[in-house]
Image: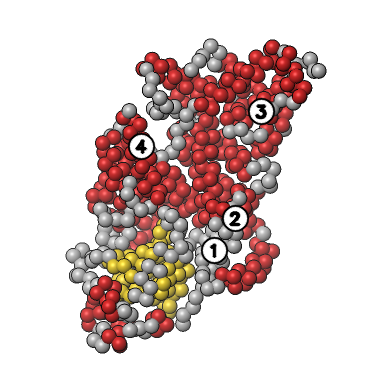
Amino acid sequence: MSTACPTANDLAAAISNGPSDAVRQHIAICARCADEWDAVERVVASYRKLPWQDASAARIEEQRTALLASAALAKPVSARRWSRWVVPVLAAAAVVVLIAAWPAPTTAPGAPFHATLTAHGDAAFLRISSRPDEVVMLTAGTLSVEVTPLSRGERFRVVTKDAEVEVRGTAFEVVADHGRLVAVHVWHGKVEVRPLAGDPVALTRGESWATPAITASVVPVDPVKQRVSPEQMSTTSRAEIVPQDAARQRNATRPVPRSSQPSVPEQIVDVGTSAYQEAWAALRSGDHESAARGFERAATIAPHSALAEDAWYWRAVSLARAGQPVKARAAFAAFLETYRGSPRAPQASAMLGWLLFDAGDLVGAENRFRTAVTDPATAVRDSASQGLEAIRRRRE
Amino acid sequence: MKGKLLALRRVAGDPVEMSDTALLAACAVGDGAALGALFDRHRSAVQRFLARLADQRDTDDLVQETFLQVNRSADRFRGGSSVKTWILGIAVNVSRHHRRAEVRRNSATTTFIGQPQPSPITPDEATRKREFAMHLQRALVELPHDLRVAFVMCDLEEVPGVEAAAVLAVREGTLWWRLSEARKALRAALEGMSP
């Protein structure tokens, strides 16, 4: 039987790892060591009971988004370091995987982009941002796009000056001329076309959308002649792009009313796009105040461009991240007032709810959470639910 | 001319089903989905760990910075500990670099203020419990950083000493000494206090 007291280190290890037989026997006969053991256990138990303040669901979602956006831009270290031998191995593996993967294409693991873009002829386009909010701006020409299934919270859009096309895992072709959206054809999956002036149009497999000028002036009367196979799509003239299914023509080729918005000069849109890109770079680098200023500039320069809505949203997020809750609350409120039908509205409502909660405005927060609590997106719904629960607890 | 590009299919399966080690390996080759899965799996532990180590106002930023470092360092994981312990080790370094001791000491007492109480209690009890919680937190914050890290990592997060020593790059004996000193200091600070 051991009678000598263990050293401080041995006792510390024994408390963490569990006592050896010798230590256990010693404690049974040594009141001093037994007291110390008990005291440490009481201290540890007290600390373990302490609550800790977790981030809000909205904040977590923000963190996650920013993390993935930053990571998407970072070049993998291992790829650089071992590229000499990895490249040939990957090339060989690619052949095997390509066979295994055929015919369903997906995004390369870790690729910054969901979309595989194939430009036809001299199509002019620009990748504005990468995952998780991937945006491609198409100025002119035809672009074939294949988008792998998006994860929760991710988006993919093709934007022009006057419209945006949003998808969730699909392949489609989009045509623009002088920055204006001309036509869209869906190979598979679902696509929503949102003209700046006009109602959104949902397209599914085989359907097309074209601007009214084209459909009104050039579309042949004979329904048989209207049909264009997907194979013909990239080589046919834009005037021939019409719905394949005549029965769906009313929905798929909805005439777009004359824009009530002022037209946006091309140079202004370009400057606005540059400002938007710079703001995104600032946001990714963690310079939230610069990001907020940049997004405001982008939205102010081209208020009627397709990116203005995004710019106002991200300005509000940037202000919140910059630790300016008062400005952030005002920015989210203004965004929600201006873009009530925005896909981002529920998320903005949830974020505003938490900002109001933090400010002690429980009634205002509750109203915002209630508008977000039925959102189909799990993250938004959960955030709003947790907000309502937090309000309930705060009121008790 | 019309072409079609096919990207590689993920061969390792759904990130949700992958082990931590597999996710980290995927991160090392730039797999954003794997990084997202690691974040979902360990964010809460990292947030809690950092909330104990650092000022609450900084915690969110430190969590994000920790996972960015995880992504950058993924190829350097050698399996000497669990992935969770390895991530906590990165969080320690991130915390150390961002430490602003004076500011944290001034505001540390706000960490547990405003927490919901688990059961109805009288105002006097509430005050006493809150004061005790603040006292606990203050005692922890006033520990030297290395001792605090040892205590939070081993006693609160229950990381095995061998793994903690490995990720902190210290000898096991040093880790036990730090832990012993931390416990001794906290015992002294809480002498006579009760919840």
Residue B177 spot, x, y in % from top left: 69, 25
**Compared to A9, does A390 lie above or below?**
below
- Residue A29 placement: quadrant: top right
Kindly identify the amino acid type of the residue bearing the numbered disc 2: Ala
Question: Label 4, on which residue?
Answer: A389
Q: Quadrant of the N terminus of chain A?
A: top right
Q: Nearer the viewer, residue B161 or B195?
A: B195
As measured in the structure, the alpha-carbon distance from the residue carrying label 1 to the one carrying label 2 is 11 Å
Residue B1 spot, x, y in % from top left: 46, 82
Residue A324 spot, x, y in % from top left: 35, 39
Residue B106 spot, x, y in % from top left: 45, 24
The dot on residue A108 is 1
Are the two marked residues, 3 and 1, in contact with CB atoms closer than 8 angstroms?
no
- Residue B120 placement: quadrant: top left
Q: Secondary structure at mark 1?
A: loop
Q: Residue at x 67, y 25 (%)?
A: A15
As measured in the structure, the alpha-carbon distance from the residue carrying label 1 to the one carrying label 4 is 40 Å
Kindly identify the amino acid type of the residue bearing the numbered disc 3: Ser
For residue B116, side relative to residue B101 (left or right): left
Q: Secondary structure at mark 4?
A: helix
Kindly identify the amino acid type of the residue bearing the numbered disc 4: Glu
The dot on residue A16 is 3
Are the two marked residues, 3 and 4, in contact with CB atoms closer than 8 angstroms?
no
